[in-house]
Image (spheres, rainbow, N blue to C red):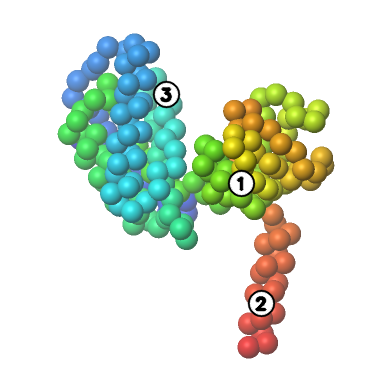
Amino acid sequence: MCIVFVCCNASERILWVSRPLFILDDKYSMKTSVNERIKDTAFRVAEENGLEFVHARIAGTSKNLSICIFIDKPGGVTHEDCVKVSRSLDTILDVEDFIPSAYLLEVSSPGLERELYSKEDFEKFVGSTAKVKTSVPTSGQRNFRGYISAVEGDDIVFEDKTSGTIRFPYSAVAKANLEIDLNEELKRNGKWEAKNKQS
């Protein structure tokens, strides 16, 4: 049952607070099972609405759960996209009633500097500027900033601003996200403004 609804227009986020009707045994295996069901359900709802399921971030305790679903589409998601996914997902979670506590449901776009959660994400954003942290050193460093050059098999080829071209296995990626190059954006905006003035 939905108790509270909050809409944050600036970040295109939709928040719901719900309380299921019963409590389940709080064991690790049960928590893992619940998390997987949430992700599977969110994936299905996003797909049915013509959207990409990017990631589900599930945090908190069994008595205070926070669920954040990230969705995307070419050109970016809209407020209406977040509303549709929120309502559909909240309805399904209430009907299936498998979450063992009250929970906060949030649906959001991943943002311009979205995190990269899979090798497929790296493939999708080849040529984009990014920031990557690896679990083990590569060429004597673990933090890289530059752009994704290619994905070859299980390896990421990265053009680092400091070390040049480097290669590391995807399995070594601890964290990665896109990074907006402000200089490039300013150049692009400058060219756009100059073109508009000429026309």
Residue 60's label in the rendered image is 3
**CB under 8 Å between discs 2 and 1:** no
Identify which amino acid the numbered label 1 is placed on. Leu
Q: Residue at x 24, y 25 (%)?
A: 98
- Per the model, the C-alpha gap separating discs 2 and 3 is 47 Å
Residue 68, horizontal then vertical, whole percent: 41, 37
Quadrant of the image for the C terminus?
Answer: bottom right
- Per the model, the C-alpha gap separating discs 1 and 3 is 26 Å
Quadrant of the image for the N terminus?
Answer: top left
Front residue of 90 and 32: 32
- Per the model, the C-alpha gap separating discs 2 and 1 is 25 Å
Looking at the rendered structure, the secondary structure element under dot 2 is helix
Residue 193's label in the rendered image is 2
Disc 1: CA contacts within 10 A as few (<14), some (14-19) or many (>=20): many
Q: In the image, is 171 to the left or to the right of 88?
A: right
Residue 178's label in the rendered image is 1
Instruction: State the image quarter where residue 24 is shown.
Output: top left
